[in-house]
């Protein structure tokens, strides 16, 4: 089935994910300041870990992210958390023992102090808004 947008609803210029859009509804009412429901993968939040260290994680998460996370490579809980964080952490300034920026990978995540790991997991969980998801019941 081919998807299309009626010409009257196609913006003349491309719309960025965070750009506000004004368009008429089917009743002709104009809705002001609409934002895209698509996730901008480059919209990042800086999570401060203290002493100048930080990680960058997405402000919003897509369904595609949840699919990638559910297809993680490990089965134990520690591995699942590390798998998730490898996908969540887009950048960090955490240094290794030589003073170089460490690579974001499972091995380095497993080497983080527990308190830092918990700060990152808490921030990611808050951004995912997992506690605010609507309850959906599917027909039997």
Image (cartoon, rainbow, N blue to C red):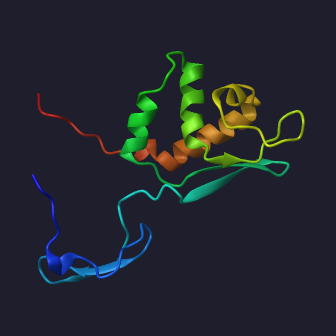
Q: Is residue 1 left or right of residue 122?
A: left
Nearer to us in this view, 129 or 104: 104
Q: Position of residue 27 (x, y in %)?
A: 11, 80
Residue at 16% over, 77% down: 7
Q: Residue furthest front?
A: 2
When asked about the image quadrant of residue 99, the answer is top right
Q: Is residue 30 above or below residue 1?
A: below
Q: Is residue 30 left or right of residue 43?
A: left
Residue at 38% over, 43% down: 64
Q: Position of residue 137 (x, y in %)?
A: 20, 36
Mark yes or no: residue 95 visible: yes
Nearer to us in this view, 52 or 29: 52
Q: Is residue 64 above or below residue 109?
A: below
Q: Residue furthest right?
A: 98
Residue at 42% over, 56% down: 39
Mark yes or no: residue 32 visible: no
When asked about the image quadrant of residue 140, the answer is top left
Q: How many marks?
A: 0
Residue at 19% over, 83% down: 29
Q: Position of residue 81 (x, y in %)?
A: 57, 28
Q: Is residue 86 above or below residue 31?
A: above
Q: Is residue 131 above or below residue 41?
A: above
Q: Position of residue 23 (x, y in %)?
A: 25, 80
């Amino acid at each position: 089935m081919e998807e299309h947008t009626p010409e009257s609803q196609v913006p003349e210029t491309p719309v960025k994910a965070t750009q506000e859009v004004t368009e008429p509804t089917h009743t002709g009412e104009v809705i002001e300041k609409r934002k895209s429901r698509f996730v901008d993968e480059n919209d990042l939040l800086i999570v401060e870990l203290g002493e100048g260290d930080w990680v960058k994680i997405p402000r919003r998460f897509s369904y595609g992210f949840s699919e990638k996370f559910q297809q993680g490579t490990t089965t134990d809980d520690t591995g699942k958390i590390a798998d998730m964080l490898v996908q969540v952490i887009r950048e960090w300034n955490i240094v290794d023992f030589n003073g170089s920026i460490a690579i974001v990978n499972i091995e380095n995540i497993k080497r983080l102090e527990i308190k830092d790991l918990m700060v990152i997991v808490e921030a990611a969980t808050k951004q995912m808004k997992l506690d605010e998801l609507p309850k959906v019941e599917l027909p039997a």
